[in-house]
Amino acid sequence: MASPKTLASPEKEVRFTRSAQGRLFLVLTAGLLALSLGLVALATQGTEFEAPRLEGYLWTALLPLIAAWFLARLGIRCIRHAYIIFTPLGVEIFPLFRPEATMQLLLWSTIDSLECDVTSQRMIIHFTAEKTAGVIVSLAPILPAQRELLQRLVVSVSQQRAASSNSSPTL
């Protein structure tokens, strides 16, 4: 699995990963591993009076094992790779599959305002002052503690942008 690349200046960006989503995939992995182990026990263990209940069906333990492998890789990917990145250029949003081809870079020059609603688990990025165009980003894949940090970041960035736009001279 590819690892995240090292950053030239990591102090200039804030990353949020899909750690809540990754945690769910890893819990499902543990359940599938337990199911696979149970099938192995049922297919190989019997008593002196009785044959194993699933004798001849040891191969069935491979099905949940294969699914567990895929879910483990997906969970690790969700935990390691970024979902939302705030950079000096703008906001980068990475989808779960094929992020290198379908990521979105929203430049600060195109963003009019940001809203973060932790209760409804979404962040809204508005492109116009009328709030008729924009992007809605789900915050469900992010851990609740990180959602609070994201909300503080959005408030801080919005205040900085408002202060910089008020201090600029008008023509």
Image: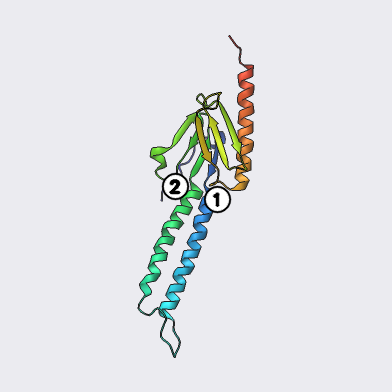
From the viewer's perspective, tell me whether residue 142 is left or right of residue 62: right
Residue lying at the far bottom in this picture: please name it: 49
Residue type highlighted by circle 2: Ser
In the rendered image, residue 1, in percent from the top left (x then y), is placed at 41, 51
Above or below, 69 against 10 in this view is: below
Query: In this rendering, does residue 28 appear at all?
Result: yes
Mark 1 vs mark 2, foreground winner is 1
The image quarter in which residue 13 lies: top right
Q: Residues within 10 Å of mark 1 (few under 14, many from 20)?
A: some
**Mark on residue 3?**
2
Q: Which mark is residue 151?
A: none
Query: Which secondary structure, mark 1?
Result: helix
Q: Which residue is mark 1?
A: 20
Nearer-the-camera pick, 122 or 86? 122
- In the rendered view, would you say 59 is above or below 47? above
Question: Viewed as shown, does residue 124 lie left or right of 65?
Answer: right
Q: Is residue 8 left or right of residue 116?
A: left
Q: Are marks 1 and 2 in contact (CB under 8 Å)?
A: no
Residue furthest top in the image: 171
Query: Which quadrant of the figure has residue 62?
Result: bottom left
Mark 1 residue type: Ala
**Which residue is depicted at the point 61% across and 30% down?**
157
Q: Is residue 8 visible?
A: no
Residue at 41% x, 82% y: name it.
52
Q: Earlier in the sequence, mark 1 or mark 2?
A: 2
Distance CA(mark 1)–CA(mark 2)? 19 Å
Instruction: Tell me where residue 101 sits by quadrant.
Output: top left
